[in-house]
Image (cartoon, grey):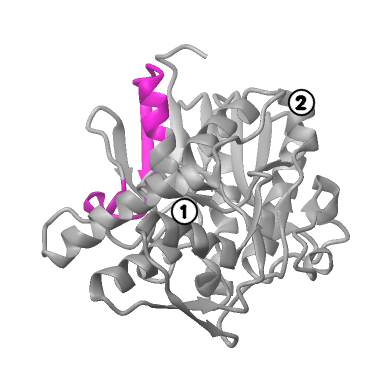
Amino acid sequence: MAHNDKILIAGAGGFIGGALVALLRKQGHRNLRAVDVKPFEEWYQRFDDAENLSLDLNLKENCDAAAEGAVEIYNLAANMGGMGFIEHNKALCMLSVLINTHLLQAALKHGAAKRFFYASSACVYNADKQKTFEAPSLKEEDAYPAQAEDGYGWEKLFSERMCRHFREDYGLTTRVARFHNVYGPWGTWFGGREKAPAAICRKVIEAKVAGKHEIEIWGSGNQTRSFMFIDDCTEGIQKITNSEILGPINLGSSEAVTINQLVDIAENIAGIKLKRNYDLSAPKGVNGRNSDNTLIQKYLHWEPSTSLRSGLEKTYRWIFDQYMARERGEAGVIRESHLAQ
């Protein structure tokens, strides 16, 4: 793809979308159309040399306008957040199906799109396969028989199928990645939509600054997850988009940890130890989930490789600076996200 070809990044005002725009610019691409529903001042990263549009992509006419002339489309736009958000906003999460449907239709209508990337999630996986704390490594076929996360996971699974059938029926080149817990600087860290790494960092910072060395943890702390650093995520998006991988594929770290171990790492970075208070009534998600990277290694000879310790340290430092700036009442502090992360 030539550097002057138009690329559409939907959800560009969010965490992953903003990071992808930054990477594309670094690579020399200058014909970028960045779209998000949020007003510009709430975008996490915004670049003046991109074509920035504030549009609600739930609406078909806005998807038509956004996709016109684009040879490559990255759909990262969706209503989502951490477990606390998706468990209490199931209908809102499912309405994101409108975005992907309308963008796929727009890609066909304008006939320009050579590649269409869709950001799916590990929340599509069968819940029965995630009942143990031993961090079962989920293979791509484990999404079926379907028993996805209620609301958010079902929307993602349906949209994966939509991409498949647009490829099979209409010849649109679609690629799908199932994200496993993406984190890093420039992400949501407060307000209810943040995911576990950012939430733990913020809670540790709050405890350290306040001198009250206690932390609340949702669930027993024995839940297992893997967490992928943002740089690995954006690199993987590009590799998958430009590959010949037809079906949905895992994009995540295979380094599984418990939530308690995640807190251990954050405490070590902060240089403190905290009393842990476990809220067993809080949303906690499935008991165990890890990314099986057999397929991505086979097809790309690559997998996310940033260690959790390294990535979390960068994330902690960034959130600490944001937290202190907010405490001082400084302008320009990152706001809560309202669209895709």
Note whether residue 63 is visible: no
Is residue 273 in the magenta section?
no
- Tell me the element at label 2: helix
The label shown at residue 192 is none
* For discs 1 and 2, the disc positioned in front in the rendered view: 2
Q: CA distance from mark 1 to mark 2?
A: 27 Å
Amino acid at circle 1: Ala
The residue most toward the top is: 2
Pick the residue in front: 109 or 268.
268
Q: Which residue is mark 2?
A: 299
- Tell me the element at label 1: loop
Q: Which residue is mark 1?
A: 340
Image coords of residue 28 (percent x, y): 37, 16
Image coords of residue 295 (percent x, y): 79, 34
Pick the residue in front: 44 or 281.
281
The residue most toward the bottom is: 281
Q: Is residue 189 left or right of residue 247?
A: left
Please name the residue shown 68% across and 54% down the image. 122
Q: Is residue 272 above or below residue 50?
A: below
Residue bounds of the magenta highlight: 21-44
Q: Is residue 63 above or below residue 181?
A: above
Crowding at mark 2 (Cα within 10 Å: few <14, some 14-19, many 20+): few
Q: How many marks?
A: 2
The residue most toward the right is: 145
Amino acid at circle 2: Tyr
Crowding at mark 1 (Cα within 10 Å: few <14, some 14-19, many 20+): many
Pick the residue in front: 188 or 1.
188
Q: Is residue 291 above or below residue 203?
A: above
Please name the residue shown 78% across and 51% down the image. 137
Q: Quadrant of residue 32?
A: top left
Please name the residue shown 70% across and 63% down the image. 154
